[in-house]
C-alpha cells in the first residue's frame, strides 16, 4: 500500500493537470472568439472583494451568502471574501471605474476561478472556474435574447449537443411582492411538509423554495401559483418579446414556471441552458443567467439595466469528455535540434532563439548528451528534420541537416540554416 503524501490539495479543490489544460484552453479560445465578434471586452476583477459586496449584492438570504462563502478578517481588520460568483465584482468595477460615462451598452466578459464552500461532487468543486459576460445600460429585451444566443453558440461551438434553454420571468419590484404573498399563503398551509431549509426560506425568501431540489418540496411546489400568471403589464410585455426573439432565431427553449435562480438580484428574465441525454434526461446546467436591472443602483451606482450569464468550465469539460469530444493536438515541431558537447550546447541555445524569432517551432533535449537518445526523441515526436551540431561543426560554423525519413544528411553554414529550413518547410 503506497504511503499517503504529507500534503494534499484542500478538500474540493483540484489541480488542473496538463491533460485537462487543453480543454481549458479550447474553452477559453472559443469564448474569446465568439464574444469578440459581439464586441465584448475582457475584464478581470480581484479574487478578493469586500464581504458586504456579496451579502448585499447576491442576497443575505441566499445559500451562497449564508453557507458557502470563504470570508475572513485581514490583519488590517478588513472583512474580505473569496469571490463566490462574478457579477457583483463586475458591477462594483462598472461603478467604481465610471463606466456609466462610456457609450452604452458596456459589454464585458470574464474567465477565472471562484470559490464556494459546498459538498464536493462531480462537476462541482470548492474552487471552480467560470466564464461569463455582462451587458450594462440596455433594457431592450433583444439583449436578453442575444445573451442567451451567445451562450448557446459557445456551447454548440464546443460540439455539445441536445442543449435546451429553460426560461422564465420572475417579474420586478412592481409585481413580485404580490406574487410572494401568494406563495407564502400557499406554502404556509403546507409548511410541515417542507424540508428544514424551505421552512426557513418561507420566512426569509419564499421564491427560493421554488429552487429546492428536495423531492418532497418538488412535489409541493408543482402545484404552487406560477409567477407568469401574475406579471405586471411591463414584465409580461418584456418576456413576450424575449420569447419572440428566441422564436425568430430558432433556439430550442421551454418555459419553466418554477425557475427562479438562486440569487436575489435577478429581475424579469432568468434562464438556464441544460444538456439532455439522447433519451431526454437532464444531465445538468451548463450556463445560467438573467436580467438584474436593480443591482447597479443597489450597490451605489445609477439606475442601470443589465443582463448577464455565467457558465461552469469544469461542468462543460465533463460534458465534453462524456461526449468523447476530442481536442485537436498541437502540431508537433517539424525540426529537432540535437547537440554534442558544451560549445555545441551554447551555440544551439542561441540558434533556438533565432528560430523562435522567425516563428518556427523547434523541439530539443538540451539535458541529454547522447546523440542516439536525441535522435530517438526526434523520431518519436515525428520531426521531419534533425539539425545536428557537434564539437567539430561548432568550431567550423556549420551544422548537419538530417532528413529523418530518408536518412540523407547535408552540411550547411550555421548562419544560413534558419533561412534554409524556412525554404524546406514551405515545400512540405
Image (tube, rainbow, N blue to C red):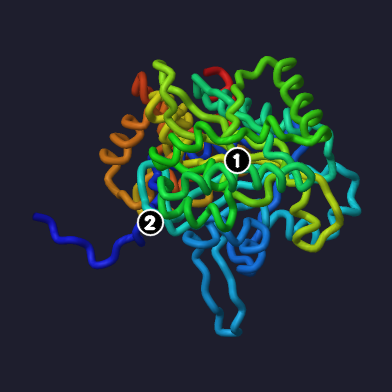
Query: Image point 77% across, 30% down: which residue?
Result: 236
Q: Nearer the viewer, residue 22 or 220?
A: 220
Q: Nearer the viewer, residue 120 or 208?
A: 208
Task: Read off the residue under disc 1.
Answer: 260
Q: Is residue 20 above or below residue 320?
A: below
Examine the image and state in which quarter residue 101 appears: bottom right
Cα distance, mark 2 to mark 1?
68 Å
The N terminus lies in quadrant: bottom left
Q: Position of residue 120 (x, y in %)?
A: 37, 51
Q: Nearer the viewer, residue 401 or 283?
A: 283
Q: Are marks 2 and 1 in contact (CB under 8 Å)?
A: no
Query: Image point 60% across, 31% down: which residue?
Result: 257
- Name the mark on residue 342: 2
Query: Image point 59% across, 22% down: which residue?
Result: 254
Q: Position of residue 271 (x, y in %)?
A: 62, 34
Q: Nearer the viewer, mark 2 or mark 1?
A: 1
Q: Is residue 141 above or below residue 172?
A: above
Q: Secondary structure at mark 1?
A: loop
Query: Image point 53% across, 23% down: which residue?
Result: 163
Q: Position of residue 113 (x, y in %)?
A: 53, 53
Lower position in the chain sequence, tag 2 or tag 1: 1
Q: Nearer the viewer, residue 405 or 114?
A: 114
Residue 154, visible in the rendered structure: no
Label 1 crowd bin: few (<14), some (14–19), many (20+), radius 10 Å: many
Residue 199 horizontal side relative to residue 279, left or right: right
Label 2 crowd bin: few (<14), some (14–19), many (20+), radius 10 Å: few
Residue 290 horizontal side relative to residue 99, left or right: left
Amino acid at each position: 500500500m503506497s504511503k499517503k503524501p504529507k500534503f494534499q490539495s484542500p478538500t474540493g479543490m483540484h489541480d488542473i493537470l496538463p491533460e485537462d489544460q487543453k480543454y481549458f484552453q479550447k474553452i477559453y479560445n472559443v469564448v474569446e472568439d465568439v464574444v469578440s465578434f459581439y464586441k465584448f471586452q475582457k475584464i478581470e476583477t480581484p479574487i478578493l472583494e469586500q464581504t458586504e459586496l456579496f451579502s448585499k449584492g447576491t442576497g443575505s438570504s441566499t445559500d451562497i451568502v449564508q453557507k458557502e462563502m470563504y470570508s475572513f478578517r485581514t490583519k488590517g481588520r478588513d472583512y474580505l471574501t473569496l469571490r463566490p460568483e462574478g457579477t457583483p465584482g463586475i458591477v462594483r468595477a462598472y461603478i467604481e471605474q465610471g463606466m456609466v460615462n462610456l457609450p452604452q451598452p458596456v459589454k464585458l466578459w470574464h474567465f477565472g476561478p471562484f470559490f464556494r464552500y459546498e459538498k464536493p461532487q462531480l462537476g462541482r468543486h470548492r474552487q471552480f472556474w467560470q466564464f461569463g459576460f455582462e451587458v450594462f445600460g440596455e433594457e431592450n429585451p433583444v439583449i436578453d435574447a442575444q445573451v442567451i444566443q451567445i451562450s448557446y453558440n459557445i456551447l454548440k461551438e464546443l460540439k455539445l449537443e441536445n442543449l435546451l434553454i429553460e426560461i422564465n420571468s420572475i417579474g420586478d419590484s412592481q409585481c413580485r411582492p404580490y406574487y410572494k404573498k401568494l406563495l407564502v399563503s400557499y406554502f404556509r398551509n403546507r409548511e410541515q411538509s417542507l424540508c428544514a431549509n424551505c421552512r426557513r426560506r418561507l420566512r426569509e425568501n419564499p421564491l427560493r423554495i421554488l429552487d429546492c431540489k428536495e423531492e418532497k418540496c418538488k412535489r409541493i411546489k408543482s402545484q404552487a401559483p406560477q409567477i407568469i400568471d401574475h406579471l405586471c403589464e411591463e414584465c409580461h410585455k418584456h418576456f413576450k418579446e424575449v420569447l419572440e426573439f428566441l422564436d425568430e432565431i430558432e433556439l430550442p427553449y421551454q418555459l419553466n414556471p418554477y425557475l427562479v435562480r438562486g440569487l436575489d438580484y435577478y429581475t424579469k428574465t432568468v434562464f438556464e441552458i441544460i444538456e439532455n441525454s439522447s433519451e431526454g434526461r437532464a444531465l445538468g446546467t451548463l450556463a445560467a443567467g438573467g436580467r438584474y436591472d436593480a443591482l447597479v443602483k443597489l450597490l451605489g451606482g445609477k439606475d442601470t439595466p443589465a443582463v448577464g450569464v455565467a457558465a461552469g468550465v469544469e461542468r462543460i469539460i465533463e460534458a465534453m469528455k462524456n461526449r468523447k469530444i476530442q481536442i485537436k493536438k498541437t502540431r508537433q515541431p517539424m525540426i529537432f535540434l540535437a547537440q554534442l558537447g558544451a560549445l555545441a550546447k551554447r551555440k544551439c541555445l542561441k540558434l533556438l532563439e533565432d528560430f523562435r524569432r522567425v516563428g518556427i517551432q523547434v523541439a530539443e533535449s538540451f539535458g541529454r548528451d547522447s546523440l542516439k537518445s536525441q535522435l530517438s526523441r526526434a523520431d518519436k515526436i515525428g520531426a521531419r528534420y534533425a539539425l545536428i551540431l557537434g564539437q567539430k561543426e561548432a568550431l567550423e560554423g556549420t551544422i548537419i541537416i538530417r532528413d529523418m525519413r530518408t536518412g540523407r544528411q547535408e552540411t550547411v553554414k550555421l548562419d544560413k540554416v534558419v533561412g534554409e529550413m524556412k525554404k524546406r518547410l514551405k515545400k512540405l
